[in-house]
Image (cartoon, grey):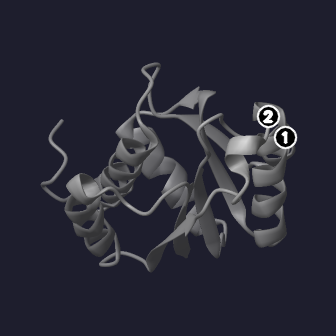
Amino acid sequence: MKLELWSIGKQHDSSLKEGIEDYTTRINRYCPVKWDIIPPPKNAGLLSEIDLKRLEGKLILDKIDKEVTLVVLDEGGGQLNSEGLAAWLTKMGNHSSKRIVFLIGGAFGIDKTVMDRADLVWSLSKLTFPHQLVRLILAEQVYRAFTITRNEKYHHR
């Protein structure tokens, strides 16, 4: 199984970059993982919210293969606790999911076309977080899920 963490926006914020890279390196001990930071369209500031989401949606759908398991992070999605994420990742690994993409959308969220394509729509919290911070939280939670699956000491319950 390979993991890809996609985010629409700017490169990692310097204040969070070290943490994101640390957890990404830790995940690599369990399975290959990489980040794909998708720059927003050049004319993003001139587009309406709807048009921007539509354009970002097209960019995403053009990049995604049919075999990919797509997880969209969205405030309207279902919530998983850490053990639930660990169980879900284990299930995907057991069901021959070769590639899982976790997607963090742009400033205005994710277009309906991408949401319809998603295999899982996941909300990290009912709180609203900056997109840059979501990257760090996502990387940490994926790492935590692998430690739970392997019954390692990182996760204390």
Packing grade of label 2 (10 A; few <14, some 14-19, many >=20) is: few
**What amino acid type should be assigned to the residue bearing mark 2?**
Ser
Residue 102 x/y as whole percent: 57, 56
Instruction: Determine contact: label 1, label 2, CB under 8 Å.
Output: yes
Question: Tag 2's secondary structure?
Answer: loop
Image-based side of 104 in relation to 141, left or right? right
* Point 18% across, 59% down: residue: 152
Locate the C terminus and report the quarter of the image it occupies. Answer: top left
Tag count: 2
- Residue, far front: 46
Packing grade of label 1 (10 A; few <14, some 14-19, many >=20) is: few
Locate the N terminus and report the quarter of the image it occupies. Answer: bottom right
Question: Tag 1's secondary structure?
Answer: helix
Quadrant assignment, res 147 = bottom left
Residue 150 x/y as whole percent: 29, 63
Q: Is residue 130 above or below residue 90?
A: above
Q: To which residue does mark 2 refer?
A: 48
Image-based side of 67 in relation to 124, left or right? right
Image-based side of 157 in relation to 88, left or right? left
Of residues 21 and 9, which is closer to you in this image? 9
Q: To which residue does mark 1 refer?
A: 51
Distance from disc 1 to disc 2, alpha carbons, whole Å, reads: 5 Å
* Point 35% across, 49% down: residue: 141
Q: Which mark is residue 13?
A: none
* Point 43% across, 63% down: residue: 11
Image-based side of 118 in relation to 129, left or right? right
* Point 40% across, 51% down: residue: 135
